[in-house]
Image (cartoon, grey):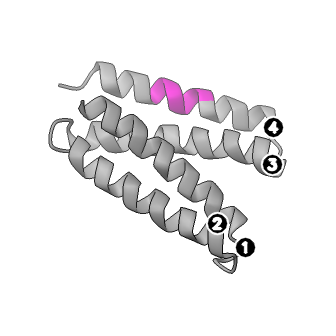
Amino acid sequence: MAWLYLGLAIVSEVIGTLALKASDGMSKLIPSLIVVVGYLTAFFLMSQTLKTIPVGVTYAIWSGLGIVGATVGAYFLFGQALSKQALLGMVIIIVGVIVLNLNSK
């Protein structure tokens, strides 16, 4: 169940981050409410994850996949450019998360 919580926490955090961009400095009501709900949900779910999964593993997966999710989401929603270097960086992040997860107890 902890892995499901972590996955949902990452999705919630990415939604909150993308809504933060859409909120225009928290000046638009609906995106601003999505930011608050997204982050509150993300932190609650992450707190549940930490009952089972070690902090280092949780945070590595959270931050790594959050970066990838926010970058891909920004590409589709806001037309943010993705260079070859950015794509390579995301591959390196994903590989790092996998290696950390495979080698952690």
Q: Give the camera-side residue of 87 and 77.
A: 77
The amino acid type of the residue labelled 4 equals Ser
Amino acid tagged 1: Asp
State the quadrant of the N terminus.
top left
Where in the figure is residue 9, as x and y percent of width and height? Answer: 40, 45
- Mark 2 to mark 1: distance in Å? 9 Å
Along the polypeptide, which appears first: circle 1 or circle 3?
1
The numbered dot on residue 24 is: 1
List the single residue furthest toward the bottom. 27
Estimate the spatial distance between the alpha carbons at disc 3 and disc 4, rounded to whole Å.
10 Å
Circle 1 SS class: loop
The residue wearing badge 4 is 83
Helix, strand or loop under label 2: helix
Instruction: Indicate which disc residue 31 carries.
Output: 2
Q: Nearer the viewer, mark 2 or mark 1?
A: 2
Q: Position of residue 2 (x, y in %)?
A: 25, 34
Using the numbered discs, state the Cα–Cα distance from disc 1 to disc 3 in whole angstroms.
16 Å
